[in-house]
Amino acid sequence: MENKTKDILDNRRFFIAGAVILVVVIFIIQLFSLQITNSDYKSWADSNAFLNRTLYPSRGMIYDREGRLLVYNEPAYDVMIIMREVQPFDTLDFCQTVGITKDIFDKRIEEIKDRRLNPGYSSYVPQRFMKQLSAKEYGVLQEKLYKFPGFYIQNRTIRNYEYSNAPLLLGNIGEVDKRDLEDDPYYVQGDDSGRSGVERSYEKELRGEKGVEILLRDAHGRVKGKYEEGAHDIAPVSGKNLTLSIDMELQAYGEMLMQNKIGSIVMIEPETGEVLCMVSAPTFDPKILVGRQRGSNHSELEKDPRKPLYDRSIMATYPPGSTFKPAQGLVFLQEGVITPNTRYSCAYGYTFRGGKPACHGHESPLGLIPALATSCNSYFCWGLHDMLDDRKRFATIQEGFEVWKNHIVSMGYGYQLGIDLPGEKRGYIPNSKVYDNTYNGRWTSSTIISIAIGQGEITTTPLQICNLGATIANRGHFITPHVVKEIENSSLDPLYTDKRYPTINKAYYEDIAEGMMHAVLSGTCRGAALPGIQVCGKTGTAENPHGKDHSVFMGFAPYDNPKVAISVLIENGGFGATYAVPLAKLMMEKYLNGEISEESKYTEEYLKNAVIQPSHVYK
Amino acid sequence: MYTNKKQNTWKTIDWVTILLYVVMVAAGWFSICGASYDFDYAGLFDPSGRPGSQLIWIGLSVILIFIIMMLDSDVYDIFAYLIYFLIILLLIATIFLAPEIKGSRSWLVIGPVRLQPAEFAKFATALALAKFMSSHGFKLTMPKNFGIALAIIFTPMLLILLQKETGSALVYLAFFLVLYREGMSGYILLAGVCAVIFFVTVMKFSEDIVGITPLGELIVSCMILAITLCLIYFACKDTKRLKISSIITTVILLGGYITSLFTPVNYAWIIIGCISIISCYLIGTSIYKRLWSYGLVALFAFGSIAFLYSSDYVFDEILEPHQQVRIKVSLGLEDDPTGAGYNVNQSKIAIGSGGLTGKGFLNGTQTKLKYVPEQDTDFIFCTVGEEQGFIGATAVLLLFMVFILRLIILAERQHSTFGRVYGYSVASIFFFHLAINIGMVIGLTPVIGIPLPFFSYGGSSLWGFTILLFIFLRLDASRKQRH
């Protein structure tokens, strides 16, 4: 019995040893699952220990066609705070130094500590307390910084502008939004990107490439040095500098003339398609959309009833009025509806429809060139009638209208031209189906006669109007208008170097150009004449259902070997000749001669001081 | 005579264990280097750094080993009670003298040296227990003897609890393995293990309810039923009553199932009802047959049910909030990676990121960057896991396993009860430390702060374990002279 008990007890060693082995086996299984089968721990460890600090490249600078610096980077200073290091200090003194109230200070501290608003918060890591102090504020703070333990300054860059002009064209930068973050993995929350203008359309070129510095971070978030001595770091690549085709002096002059008016000036170098200036009035100083005031200033601008954020040169669509007549003439010539010698009669109006649309006093019947010079409405109405209503020419009006439409579209109307700026509108050229729907399939040229003179359904942007001027100046082709002339170490998109040919025979352009020259010499836009320069032009008076007509001018100069094409549109400016023509003259004079002659000084003064603002703006 | 004895000692000492000891201490030192590596300062031998001071502790341990080896093996037998008594006095003194460090009063500060008497109480308790159990006429089955043995174990445990060193106190539960080996009923061990398993299960499933049945209670009551039926077979060797009990179970379960077709039923209650009926039947049998064993099985069944329904109360009312949280987090009931679960979570990340072969010595980013708190003391194993990977961590586990199994073999070959009891005490204490420490680091057991022997930084624990082990090796070396 004694021995049996002893045996039982002796056997217990196996139970105890078995328990030891069992526990070790269970541990090895757990280790296997942690270390071999589960890969999550590896990535968690990396996100624990590696701090990928982004190295921001400097954004490309922007120059004008004359090499003048327009946009550059300027240091700004963020005030950072490390909560752990803050010791009691004179809060009031601090608030006065950085220009905030005690309430804002307390609120900001609360926001920083709130993990819902600031998910990555750690009291060991610098947190952004204030954004973008100016150099002056920075200077004052820097001197006193020793009194505020835990506060630091971090250098950043913000955009600054040499000129207070062309805010919409240059655009501005701001923090990326949710859509940018989804569309482009390059961005992370808090990055800046171009929000409008060239800053936006050339974002990829301007931004450069971010670099990264891999740092090791301890459990408290303190940086403990570079990972493998920086072997895996990537240096940032600076953004490319841009040279614009804009002549900033010309742009500034245009903006000065357009003050207290609403409208647009677009000037293009016909040979290259380069935009020389693109004024949208009213305008504002681009500097106000930089720095801490950006948000409040932007909403101010949004609230302004004159819509200064709306780039009228490419976003506003107007009926082109009589500036459309050269395009009509080209279509008629191309389709053989008229020859330069074809004459139509005019009796103060389009007699075929009982004198509507009306016209003014001039010789009758008249040929194409005088018709352009005098801006005869009847001539182009007859032309459209002969083209569309002649069933020997086209079996149906629909067929004829489609031919007409395709010619017009080939000249850059009805679709976006493709300028290198965001937000360009396409304007509107109807097709035959639109009229079939409206008029139940029964319509003639008379039904739609307003389009003959650039009214009715047709709308165009000032850029498209100017582009027609450039096309005629080139006698039959154009290059897609663009505002960037050169990208550093890179070439332009072929879209901005290749010629585009409308479906009109080159030969017909000469007659149209001649008609436009006569308009300046003896016709409706004599006010555009410049001594010694053969200016060609076409006035327009765009009917405006909301108020006084818009004053429009389209032209180019000189007649031979043209250097510049222009469109001017002044909202509610009345007849084209009243404001648009003299303004265009000054702009061309400024560009071609480099200065304004004594004789033109009076016009300049008069235009500059003119206030043309519709009453509805101040409702 | 003296020289002769000394020669004998070095000849008969178990070199296998010493080799394992040396390997573990060396591996431990390298792990401490990895865990306390500092970016700004990388001197490994500087005595002011942790690797440097650990080297000093190791050096002093060697001297300690020589002293232990020089002494006559009878010294430990003769002075066992005295040593135990002195240590108990020291533990009492510590409660009053020790300053509060990290919420516990267990460290005696003497100049630049800090000692934790609790680490030395282990070998003293083992000596006293061995001395008592080897005394003439000792029988563990005698309630008086059993009571004194428990008193020897629980006195230091209680004092250490008063020092608020819960982890070190729990280590004394390891002595129950010794008692088991020396004849304590296996049912007490079974009851203890069952209590832990029932508790963990109830806690783990405390939120889950199937129909109107709480899942935790259902699982535990099923376990109780199964163990009760097994006990009828194994403890009472009564197949007849096992059959009758099985029939009762089947009938009640069928009845419960039929009832559940008409009305929602709490299955836990049905099974508990079943257990109660079987238990009453067993009590009747016990009285009728005048056999204790039936009654004991019934006692187990009723006790388990009582435990099941009181564990919630114990958990909510008796445990302190931070202990509740630790238990809940380690059972995965609470997901709190920034709070109480932070240590375990970071420790698992560090180990998990080691992969198969690890990141290499001094290349562990998680440990180097101090993501794991206490990584050179209680959480030292995660440095091994990160820098040496699965291979290294497994090697350390196997090293410990071989070491403990070797200690069991040595304990079994003792000629004297004193030597065997002491040997099992040593093996059990190492086993308990291994199971709880590594279980904690790899997220299997609650966070109970006890060191990993020979690996965790600290002089007290290294010395404590060294004395514990080498007294046994000394006893083993002269086992043939002892009876």
Image: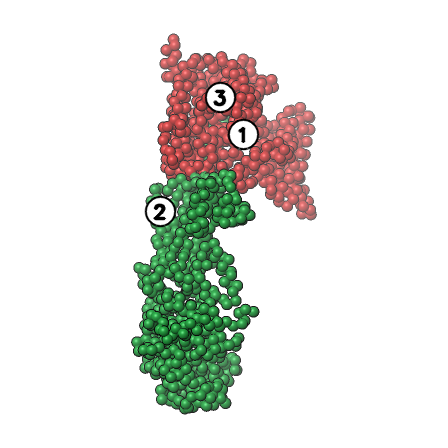
Chain colours: A green, B red
User: Measured from the top left, where is residue A234 in percent x and y?
Assistant: 35, 49
Q: In this rendering, which labeled residue sits more in front, label 3 or label 1?
A: 1
Q: Which mark is residue B384?
A: none
| Residue at 43% in and 50% down | A136
- The amino acid sitting under disc 2 is Asp
| Residue at 43% in and 44% down | A143
Give the quarter of the image for residue A500: bottom left
User: Measured from the top left, where is residue A539 in percent x and y?
Assistant: 42, 79
* Quadrant (top left/top right/bottom left/bottom right) for the N terminus of chain B: top left
| Residue at 65% in and 44% down | B212
Q: Secondary structure at mark 1?
A: loop
Query: In the figure, A455 relative to B32: above or below?
Result: below
- Crowding near the residue tagged with mark 2, few <14, some 14–19, many ≥20 C-alpha atoms within 10 Å: some
Q: Secondary structure at mark 2?
A: loop
Q: Is B288 positioned to the left or the right of B369 in the image? A: right
- Residue bearing the label numbered 3: B120
Decide which of tag 3 and tag 1 comes sooner along the chain. Answer: 1
Can residue B180 be seen here? The reply is no
Q: Secondary structure at mark 3?
A: helix
- The amino acid sitting under disc 3 is Phe
Give the quarter of the image for residue A391: bottom left
Q: Is B139 positioned to the left or the right of A481 in the image? A: right
Query: In the figure, B150 relative to A31: above or below?
Result: above
Q: Is A417 positioned to the left or the right of A97 in the image? A: left
Q: Which mark is residue A233?
A: 2
Proximity of marks 2 and 1: CB atoms separated by less than 8 Å: no
Residues at marks 3 and 1, CA–CA distance in whole angstroms: 20 Å
- Residue bearing the label numbered 1: B103
Residues at marks 2 and 1, CA–CA distance in whole angstroms: 44 Å
Mark count: 3
